[in-house]
Image (cartoon, rainbow, N blue to C red):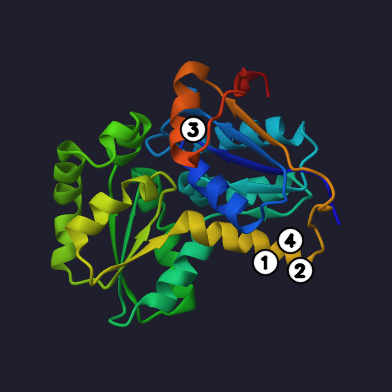
Amino acid sequence: MDNRPIGIFDSGLGGLTVLKEIKGLLPGESLVYFGDNGRTPYGTKSRDTVIKYTLQDIRFLLKHDIKMIVIACNTASALSLEKVKENVDIPVVEVIEPGALTGVRNTRSKKIGVIGTTATINSGAYEKAIKRLDESIQVISKACPLFVPLVEEGPAWWENEVAYKIALEYLSSLKNAEIDTLVLGCTHYPLLQKVIASVMGSEVKLVNSAHEAAKAVKRIMDKNGMRRDEKYKPTYKYYTSDSVEKFEPLCSAILNSKINTAEKIDIEKY
């Protein structure tokens, strides 16, 4: 039993899709979330910059006496995981391995598509993870850099005509490649899932890396006896490096719950 909270971070809003999945699977757990909206997106930054930002994010979360770190950002997972493990002594859950594993389990044609930020795709992290599981699988990757800023604009942009046209531009080559499974390799992308599904068609299975990461969190918690005592009510804390006035309504929209206790922090201090 461990009553400490779980720490979750992302470059912005996308990690809230992971938090939402964790709340659903582990409703008794306390959670601390940090969204680095002031420096989003990470996907266009250099490896060194992403590592620097990731370690700052984690140092902030460690101030909250967390029992686990969830890297709810594919770019940070792809570029920073080893550095993170070198710097902490608590369990770390990332989003790439769980998504890759589900993709391998889902495919029948052995053709898997992966979409993500430019940094995630260029890292080859998903292709390497998939190939470790099954060398015979063909992986077709596509960077979709406009998806993150589109999501960060808010719900009005998640299913509109602009979103559809951008998705069509990005995803046509994957559709033409006749993949049967598409891994959403960024935690922002589940918020565009309806648009992505409409472009790809019902025959293509979408893998939500946020959902798969949450399942990985639950497995580790159960295996190591890390669940919170149910007699204590869970707490939820939200932090951002940018405007609280913008963060709170977007956070509320993603979580389907009114959030009005978010705090802005100066992440450069960490």
Q: Disc 2 marks which residue?
A: 223
**Which residue type does callout 1 highlight?**
Arg
The residues tagged by marks 4 and 3 sit, at their Cα atoms, a distance apart of: 25 Å
Q: Residues within 10 Å of mark 4 (few under 14, many from 20)?
A: some
Task: Confirm or deny contact between disc 2 and disc 1 (CB under 8 A).
Answer: yes
Residue 264 x/y as whole percent: 59, 18
Mark 1 lies on a secondary structure that is helix
Q: Disc 4 marks which residue?
A: 221
Mark 3 lies on a secondary structure that is helix
Q: Residues within 10 Å of mark 3 (few under 14, many from 20)?
A: many
**Which residue type does callout 3 highlight?**
Cys
Q: Disc 1 marks which residue?
A: 219
Q: Quadrant of residue 235?
A: top right
**Between 68 and 251, the one nearer to me in the picture:** 251
**Which residue type does callout 2 highlight?**
Lys
Task: Confirm or deny contact between disc 2 and disc 4 (CB under 8 A).
Answer: yes
